[in-house]
Image: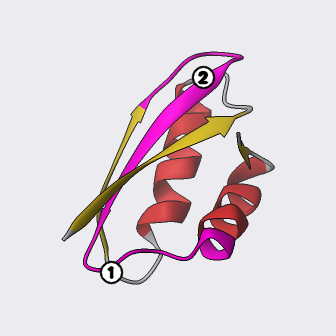
Amino acid sequence: MTSIDYAVAGMTCEHCARAVTEELSALDGVTAVTIELVAGGVSTVTVTSAAPLSGPDVAAALDEAGSYTLA
């Protein structure tokens, strides 16, 4: 298991956090997603997975969730 923190910009509310959690959870091997929401700022998203995820996969999932970006 690996756990990686990502700095994510663009989330403003719990709805944003749920959308990001849903998309990241759909990636292969992801077992948990936790978010420390900083509304309108840079939030910390912790992803636990069986193996390290690729940066492009994480960026694509964030974009699919609602145009959020890695900061």
44 relative to 58, above or below: above
Q: Which mark is residue 5?
A: none
How far apart in space, not on screen, are marks 1 and 2 (Cα)? 26 Å
Magenta residues (range): 36-57
Residue located at (63% from left, 39% from top)? 8
Residue located at (57% from left, 38% from top)? 7
Q: Classify mark 1: helix, strand or loop.
A: loop
Q: Would residue 27 appear left or right of 43 to someone viewing this image?
A: left
Which residue does the numbered mark 2 point to in the structure image? 13
Q: Amino acid at mark 2?
A: Cys
Confirm whether the magenta stretch covers residue 8.
no
Which residue does the numbered mark 1 point to in the structure image? 29
**The residue positioned farthest toward the left in the image shown:** 1
Q: Amino acid at mark 1?
A: Gly
Q: Quadrant of residue 38?
A: top right
34 relative to 27, above or below: above
* Residue 45 percent location from the top left of the image: 46, 42
